[in-house]
Amino acid sequence: MPDELDLLRRANPVPADAPHFGDGPLDPHAERHLDRLLHHTPPPRRFRLPRRTAPYRTPRETPAPRRLARLRTRTGIPLPRPRPAWALAAAGAVLAATLTAVLVGPGTQPALAAPRPLTVRVHSTPVPLARMAELAAAAAQDGSPRLRKGTHVQSWSLGMADGEPPVTLPEERVVRWRADAGGTEVVVATDPRHPGRPVLTDTALDPHVVADGQVISRTTYPPSWSDAPPAATPPHTPAALRTYLGETVQPGRRTPARTLSTDELLDGVDQLLDHWTLGARESAALVRLLADSGGLRPLGEVTDRLGRRGEAYAHQGGDGHGRRMLILDPRTGAVLGMETTFTRDDPRYGVKAGDVMEYKAWMR
């Protein structure tokens, strides 16, 4: 039987004695291609988006943690986050202008700009997380509101491509579950900062502008009774919740839950809130857990992107992580939002330190 080297030699498509090898003359086919490259303008390239993974899966289909994955998302360097690989420098600008004229007339601009980082109110007094945990525990004594499966979230996520300006994709997602354990998900293109303006979206494998409030997708989920986090019902004690979040970010982990880093805790919170709307007891347990972790620094009062007043807490991620800001309701400790910003410039993607990579605002 011939060895591998002999097989490779036989498979060589361009043997050394080929008539047009090396610096030899081009054949007619190659001549035509060269002439086209030198003297003809190439046709415009069509930029297409890779198919995005649905932001919500049924419990039986829930993959390993996104961030990231949808980390997606939280890095000072754009590492494991899926990025739309397309450009808007020329084709996108023409597309936006054309669709804007069709949708709303020539006088209205689409909502394409990235949100500015949230700013802390001047002279506001930071509230320590330990104090916030006490307030949340007091608010949870009557047990209301109660835990509910499903979520309502407004998000702004940054799309990047090499050498092209970044763009922001705003979406609102509502997931509801019925008594028969089946569920529905509706995703809408909308940006509350610019009501009525067209919105950029990436559906149908192509970037395009749609009218504000355009339904991007409707999904129906069959009944599922998964007992694995984050599909499983979250507990309402800090110790049990820590274990739950550990299993959420690292399914099947055998490492003691107490070793969870603050980055991992925040990753778990993100995934938890994409599946559940926490009740008062669960929110109180979460705030106590975050206070005990010691990784979040109180900043003061902010107004989130939906106009809600909140208390901000920041965490400077480790290697490969950006800065994350968690916003809590000052009365109940419920999570209102989470913002991830770059910690250093990256000219490859046209981003600077402080630019918002992702922001989520959760609602009841």
Image: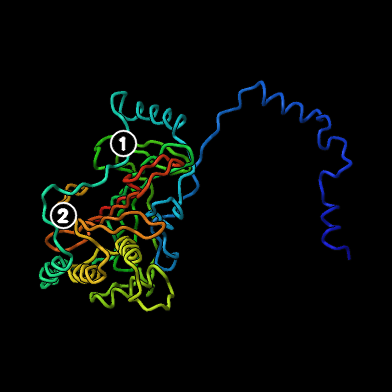
In depth, the one of 162 and 144 nearer the eye is 162
Please, which residue is most extreme toward the top here? 39
User: Which of the two discs, 1 and 2, labels the residue nearer the N terminus?
Assistant: 1
Distance from Cα at disc 1 to Cα at disc 2:
29 Å
- State which quadrant residue 22 falls in: top right
Q: Quadrant of the C terminus?
A: bottom left
In depth, the one of 351 and 175 nearer the eye is 351
Name the spot of residue 125 as percent of width and height, x first.
11, 55
SS under mark 1: loop
Amino acid type shown at disc 2? Gly
Amino acid type shown at disc 1? Ala
Whether residue 213 sits left or right of residue 252 in the image: it is left
The correct choice, above or below, for 155 with respect to 96 in the image is below
Where is mark 1, residue-wise? 111
Name the spot of residue 7 as percent of width and height, x first.
84, 57
SS under mark 2: strand
The mark closer to the camera, 1 or 2, is 2
Where is mark 2, residue-wise? 300
